[in-house]
Amino acid sequence: MSPETAPEPEQLVDHFFRHEAGRLTAWLSRVLGFNRLEQAEDIVQDTLVQALRTWRVRGVPENPAAWLYRAARHRALDVLRREQRHHRLGAALTADPDDALAGAVAALPETLLPDELADSQLRMLFACCHPALPPEAQLAMCLRVLCGLSIPEIAAAFLTSQETITKRLYRAKEKVRAGAIELVVPQGVALTERLHGVLQALYLLFNAGYNSSSSAADQLIRQDLCADAMRLTLLLLDHPATAGPATHALLGLMCLQASRFDARLSPDGAIVLLPDQDRTRWDPDLIRRGLHYLSRAATGPVVSEYHLEAAIAAEHCRCQTFADTNWPLIRQLYDLLLDLRPTPIVALHRAVAVAAEAGAAAGLRALAPLIADSALDQHYLFHAIHADLLARVGQPAAARDAWLEARLLTSSAAERGLIVEKFRGWDLG
């Protein structure tokens, strides 16, 4: 790594926290035991702090990831040996149960094999989705422990408060501490049941990255989240028992959405909406891969929500121009998706498709149930879409109120800029 191109230690530690913290935690939890999850998280945190201090003085090592794994291994050994000394202070013990564990850690090689890391992460995914945990806690655990999302990021993904997420994680970790959950990939029916939660967690992780415009400063980090979600989904496809149609459909959706990533932002960081995107900047290789995985998903009798979302994304990617979009087909796909996943967000996107197919008045009628519901009151995009439709049907006063509400509900400069630019041409009074 040359001095001219080497990033600052702070930037690199932050990068590796996003990339490696989940892998390290999964591996350490497998070695130490899943009931020591919080201890594994503490060791990883301490290792990253140590990296920041050391790299500031000595420079960034040639292989930063290998350095982190060696440091985490040594720190885990220090923790276990310190525990042994405390156990022996009060009495002369002939055998300590942690002796074997410390010996096992010491015997681990300095360099970890990719297959070992992949297996640890797969185990962690399924442990976090154990039926002993409520579904919402399963997803929060996956996103926090394995994927490295912050509490605010998880709260945004669930459209809920940070306090709620903190409580969910605390209660889930109480069950982990009690030893009620094993770090294993289940078999048979248990695997099929847990796979649904795993796919949901990876879907939410990808969305947290794909909607990265909510924080322009974190743009590159959130692109990494998309890549992490795709990498973990590929792990599932490498396991015969989890490489089913829904998994293929999810990866197809991710590839198709990621193909448009570069076109979603202008060179100065402004958000570019779908009608204005330069389609020559869409990644043809990712589109090809997405269509391949979607075709592989068409092998079973069940159509999942990921099949439908991938079909919608595929329809967009097949069009040479925005004007070519087959909105009646996309609206029909949203109808089916709303039956499978009757959430306010799906209904919001369906209303956009209805407006594109049949006009703004029809879009407002589709939006009416959401206006009466409070579920999206704190969601800036709902108010921005509402404002746009109101302006298009000639209701400037109501559009202005919705527009101002949208501006108030986002802290992102990029989103505020988009809202201002979107309504610059409307006379809102």
Image (cartoon, rainbow, N blue to C red):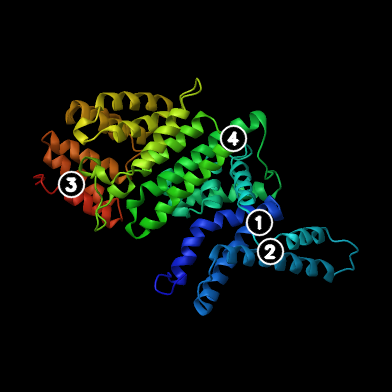
Disc 1, SS: helix
Q: Is residue 350 above or below residue 181?
A: above
Label 4 Cα crowd, 10 Å radius (few <14 / some 14-19 / many 20+): many
Q: Earlier in the sequence, mark 4 or mark 2?
A: 2
Disc 3, SS: helix
Q: Which mark is residue 188?
A: none
* Amino acid identity at mark 1: Leu
Front-most of residues 69 and 75: 69
Q: Are marks 4 and 3 in contact (CB under 8 Å)?
A: no
Disc 4, SS: helix
Q: Earlier in the sequence, mark 3 or mark 1?
A: 1
Q: Earlier in the sequence, mark 2 or mark 3?
A: 2
Q: CA distance from mark 4 to mark 3?
A: 43 Å
Q: Quadrant of residue 414?
A: bottom left
* Amino acid identity at mark 4: Arg
* Amino acid identity at mark 2: Ala
Q: Which residue is mark 4?
A: 194
Q: CA distance from mark 3 to mark 1?
A: 49 Å
Q: Which mark is residue 76?
A: 2
Q: CA distance from mark 4 to mark 2?
A: 30 Å
Q: Which residue is mark 1?
A: 28
User: At 24% from the left edge and 58% from the top edge, which residue is drawn?
Assistant: 268
Q: Are marks 2 and 3 in contact (CB under 8 Å)?
A: no
Q: Which mark is residue 422?
A: 3
User: At 19% from the left edge and 36% from the top edge, which residue is drawn?
Assistant: 389
* Amino acid identity at mark 3: Lys
